[in-house]
Image (cartoon, grey):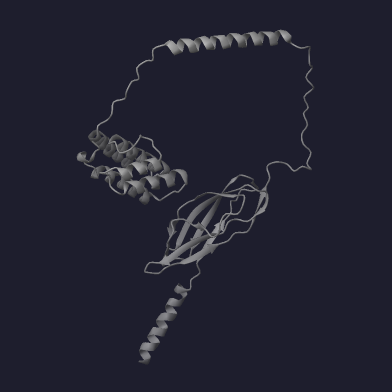
Amino acid sequence: MRRVRWAVAVGLLSTAPRMLAAQYLELFEPAAKPYHVGDTLVFKVKLTGVEQMSPVDPAPKLAQPLPAGVHLVRADSMRRITNGHYESQIVFQFFRAGVQNVPQLVQRVRNLGADPGRNIVANVDPIEIVATIPDAGEPRPEDIRPPVPVGPPAWPVLVGGGALMLVAAWLLRRWRRVRAHATPAPVATMPRISPLDARSAALKRFAELESAGFARQGDVARHYGETVDVLRDFLHAIRQSPRARAGTDELLLALARAAGIPAHAAPLLVEADFVKFAAVRPDADSAERFLSGARTVVERWEANDAVR
């Protein structure tokens, strides 16, 4: 029994350094100074000491609401550099001069097992923001141009300008009368693409986007934008959408009333809006899953599901 107890004690002591290893979330301010009001400042974020852990959230989050005069431009996803070492970037803009506090960040990490996780907080010293407009006490540059001489009133120019305005008003009135009596030209109607042709065109375009590899090249926004455009055009062609470029709310309402569209079409449209309008930047794997989901929407549609 004593040997077993000593073995357990030695095992715990051998794993203690690894269990108590320091974990850091560090925020590094940009090197180029001074910082001016409205500048886009890119801060580097490092997460270290998490060899047996992984980030829960894809990007660092704000520990508290943003203070007045600070704008969050974007927060990039964490990238694994080495074992236990992750890096990211977060971009702020400061719109008030003077000493400003940098927002506090938090990153949640957890063990590879069923660990609920823990929060690691990063702090950074306040930074100095310089105003772009000089203070009231500083001398302002004066106009060195000489005064412009003022001559006598140019009444012939005023009279001529008034006559031209009268002629222009008469011509405009006559043009409106002629236009009112003219026969309107017939409106040319664009041919409507059949649903089956729309399905084939969408699948072909998805294959082209997959071969282009925009997400792997770092252009995630273009990957999402072109993929969701193909999906929107397909929904419009099969008469499930009010118009080709309807807003997401209007399109979601049309999908709720229609039949024959897989249920996960709506989440794809919402996810694309987060990338387009909220500057969310998913990783390449998430972007490829997004394209795969859009392709599944088109592949699961059948011709007999179209609105008659």
Location of the C terminus by quadrant is top left
* Residue 252 placement: quadrant: top left
| Picture quadrant of residue 305 | top left
Looking at the rendering, which quadrant does residue 125 occupy?
bottom right
Query: Residue drawn 46% across and 61% down?
Result: 85
**Is residue 218 among the parts visible in the rendering?**
no
Residue 125 appears anywhere in the view: yes
Q: Is residue 25 shown left or right of residue 8?
A: right
- In the drawing, does residue 140 fall left or right of residue 81? right
From the viewer's perspective, is residue 271 above or below residue 56?
above
Relative to 155, is 212 on the left or the right? left
Compared to residue 39, the image places residue 170 above or below, namely above
Q: In the displayed structure, does residue 278 sit left or right of residue 135?
A: left
Q: Residue at x 66, y 8 (%)?
A: 160
- The quadrant in which the N terminus is found is bottom left
Pinpoint residue 239: horizontal percent, then vertical percent: 29, 36
